[in-house]
């Protein structure tokens, strides 16, 4: 009897435990089973500051998405792969995420060069790939699964030039660009087209090499044609040299230098000092934008990481919300459905209002901030 | 605009000349195309940067200080790299290859240490003031460059032509074995020439760093290409040729940028180089007996 009672007790306890653990354990596992998307960014190596900034932006937004209930009743998760800034590694990362982890969507990669290598792989497997920092021409032309949320220079530069034209009444300019660098050359092409469209006359076009340090000959010529402003497309080092030459030749500060994305760096002030004052650039995002969404983002970022966010974190932050909305709208973690939902997403984030063009590029430039350097710091052009 | 362009040309020409002086001296006496020379240019700029930054030296003290330290570094590097080859009387190609390898190593070390970020002198180091005379604009650092170049060229010419030491240097350049038989201390002269060349390269780096306010490890590399053109056009090993060819290159570049197209600016130097080699292979001022070339 004793034995039997013990058995009964055990059985009851066991059954009870099963009854308790069984079904609810299954539902718990289901609920905790996250929707995992992939991300390929530069997390190691010399350019990892971009990748880390982007990852920080994603992670911050991820916390907020999950705090608000996740997607499809499940938490959202990101599986990171490191590309180390290497094209082949980016391709392998994309293959691994799609093949081994079955992710329905991939964020990244960090550089346009990497996207040109990895984008076609994702496109062929019909998995949407969303670049948050890839601004080169032709990114989204790779296929219907390739998206980007970063405004290309082709969209930012015309806004910058138009704002400067209205503000300072610019009618004629001198153009200078580095002719040995693809980034600077493509920036120049954009500037040339925008200047023509705005009806601004180009008095002279001067070129230089990215590694040059002497710009006095070009700047002397620029000075002799007496422009209202000088439009520059170059990486930050030669651009700083151009600014120093402008000051050395005594071209007044009222002749502003209007730059492309290469000049949109605090380094320009560090290198060129007060010669950089008055430099005007456009930026998809600015830390000092006063709208509450942006202020909340900046404060949350500082609280979590102890440093200021940059443009890359901001673009990543917005992108994660855009992707989360697309997954919700798709109703299932399915690549095809997400792709179709993504193109319809309308989101207002820290970069301003966002939507995609039919060609999967960002459609709205109203969030572009035009900045002027004063005493070594960029501030909104007043 | 012509006057300003000519002035620009003289300024950049003075820099090319100053840079090429040490390079051509090294070749003329030591008989080696020493590719580490560009490294001395970068080194000089960095030493002056640190001297002004951390030792709070004024620029007039930092310039000779950086030049002297770079000269000492040049002695050490020359002894380590080329000493064994000289003793073994190795062919010139081996020396060239050794300096090529060493250059890559030295730049990598420098980049690892300082990164490729551009640095600048503290703003207080040198007043970036400028004079304007009849529409011509010249900055104080540009005046410093031209004055320093003139001073160094004069001192070097005096040293080589008027002193016993200079005689020994020239004798060693002419015929090392005969010079040694006549009692010239070859080792000492080699070290002296290494020192002077390194110091010249270092001084050029400081002045350029000051004028364009951009200092980074690879600044010497861009200069080396121009330096090559200058010493070949001027005649390998020819001091006077280096000065004249430097000025000619500077003037040609700025006139090309001003009146033809700035995209042709870099091409013109190498066009001059090719034409010189076609029509006068010993250089514009080189003597025919440039047997080392």
Image (tube, coloured by chain):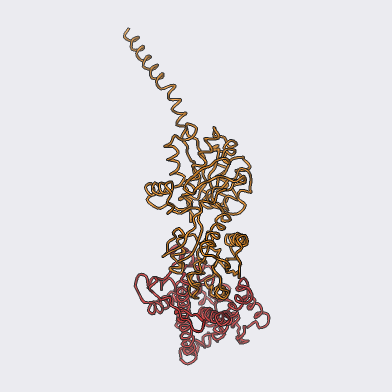
Chain colours: A orange, B red
Is residue A148 or residue B145 the one in the foreground?
A148
Residue B21 appears in the picture as rendered = no
Percent across and percent down for residue A337 are 58, 35
Percent across and percent down for residue B127 are 40, 76
**Point 46% across, 91% down: residue:** B164
Percent across and percent down for residue A91 are 58, 47
Quadrant in which the N terminus of chain B is drawn? bottom right
Is residue B69 or residue A286 the one in the foreground?
A286
Quadrant in which the C terminus of chain B is drawn? bottom right
The outermost residue toward the top is A1
Give the number of callouts: 0
Q: Tell me if residue A56 comes above or below residue B81 in the rendering.
A: above
Q: Does residue B46 appear left or right of residue B20 in this picture?
A: left
Q: Tell me if residue B99 comes above or below residue A159 in the rendering.
A: below
Is residue A100 or residue B139 the one in the foreground?
B139
Q: Tell me if residue A141 comes above or below residue B96 in the rendering.
A: above
The outermost residue toward the bottom is B162
Residue B239: quadrant of the picture = bottom right
**Point 54% across, 67% down: residue:** A230
Percent across and percent down for residue B234 are 59, 83
Q: Tell me if residue A143 comes above or below residue B77 in the rendering.
A: above
The outermost residue toward the left is A2
Residue B131 appears in the picture as rendered = yes
Residue B57: quadrant of the picture = bottom left
């Amino acid at each position: 009897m004793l034995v039997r009672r013990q058995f009964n007790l055990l059985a009851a306890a066991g059954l009870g435990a099963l009854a308790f653990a069984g079904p609810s354990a299954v539902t718990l596992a289901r609920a905790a089973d996250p929707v995992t998307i992939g991300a390929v960014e530069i997390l190691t190596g010399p350019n990892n500051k971009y990748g880390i900034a982007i990852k920080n932006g994603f992670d911050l937004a991820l916390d907020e998405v999950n705090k608000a209930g996740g997607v499809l009743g499940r938490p959202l998760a990101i599986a990171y792969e490191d590309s180390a800034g290497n094209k082949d590694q980016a391709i392998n990362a994309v293959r691994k995420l799609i093949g081994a982890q079955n992710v329905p969507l991939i964020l990244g990669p960090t550089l346009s060069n990497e996207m040109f290598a990895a984008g076609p792989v994702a496109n062929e497997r019909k998995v949407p790939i969303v670049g948050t920092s890839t601004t080169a021409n032709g990114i989204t032309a790779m296929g219907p699964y390739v998206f980007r949320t970063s405004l290309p220079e082709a969209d930012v530069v015309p806004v910058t030039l138009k704002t400067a034209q209205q503000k300072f009444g610019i009618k004629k300019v001198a153009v200078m660009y580095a002719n040995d660098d693809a980034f600077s050359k493509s920036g120049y092409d954009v500037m040339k087209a925008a200047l023509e469209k705005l009806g601004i006359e180009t008095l002279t076009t001067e070129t230089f090499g990215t590694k040059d340090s002497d710009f006095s000959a070009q700047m002397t010529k620029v000075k002799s044609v007496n422009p209202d402003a000088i439009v520059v497309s170059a990486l930050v080092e030669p651009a700083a040299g151009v600014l120093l030459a402008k000051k050395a030749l005594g071209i007044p500060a009222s002749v502003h230098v209007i730059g492309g994305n290469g000049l949109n760096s605090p380094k320009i002030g560090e290198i060129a000092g007060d010669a950089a004052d008055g430099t005007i650039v456009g930026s998809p995002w600015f830390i000092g934008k006063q709208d509450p969404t942006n202020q909340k983002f900046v404060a949350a970022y500082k609280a979590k990481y102890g440093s200021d966010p940059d443009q890359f974190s901001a673009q990543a932050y917005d992108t994660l919300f855009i992707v989360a909305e697309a997954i919700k709208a798709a109703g299932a973690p399915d690549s095809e459905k997400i792709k179709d939902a993504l193109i319809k997403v309308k989101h207002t984030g820290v970069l301003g209002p966002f939507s995609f063009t039919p060609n999967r590029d960002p459609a709205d430039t109203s969030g572009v901030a035009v900045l002027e350097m004063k005493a070594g710091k960029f501030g909104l052009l007043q | 605009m012509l006057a300003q362009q000519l002035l620009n040309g003289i300024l950049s020409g003075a820099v090319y000349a100053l840079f090429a002086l040490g390079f051509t001296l090294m070749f003329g006496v030591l008989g080696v195309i020493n590719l580490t020379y560009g490294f001395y240019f970068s080194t000089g700029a960095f030493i002056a940067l640190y001297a002004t930054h951390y030792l709070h030296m004024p620029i007039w003290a930092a310039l000779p200080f950086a030049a002297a330290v770079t000269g000492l570094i040049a002695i050490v590097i020359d002894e380590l790299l080329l000493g064994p080859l000289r003793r073994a009387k190795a062919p010139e190609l081996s020396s060239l290859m050794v300096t090529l390898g060493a250059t890559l190593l030295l730049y990598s070390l420098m980049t690892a240490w300082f990164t490729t970020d551009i640095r600048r002198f503290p703003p207080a180091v040198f007043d970036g003031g400028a004079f304007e005379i009849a529409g011509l604009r010249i900055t104080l650092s540009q005046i410093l460059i031209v004055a320093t170049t003139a001073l160094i060229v004069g001192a070097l010419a005096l040293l080589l032509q008027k002193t016993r030491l200079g005689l020994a240097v020239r004798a060693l350049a002419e015929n090392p074995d005969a010079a040694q038989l006549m009692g010239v201390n070859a080792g000492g002269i080699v070290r002296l020439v290494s020192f002077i060349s390194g110091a010249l390269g270092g001084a050029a780096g400081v002045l350029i760093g000051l004028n364009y306010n951009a200092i980074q490890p690879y600044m010497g590399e861009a200069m080396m290409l121009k330096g090559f053109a200058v010493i070949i056009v001027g005649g390998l090993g020819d001091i006077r040729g280096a000065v004249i060819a430097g000025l000619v290159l500077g003037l040609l570049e700025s006139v090309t940028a001003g009146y033809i197209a700035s995209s042709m600016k870099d091409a013109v130097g190498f066009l001059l180089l090719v034409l010189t080699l076609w029509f006068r292979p010993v250089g514009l001022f080189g003597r025919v007996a440039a047997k080392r070339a």
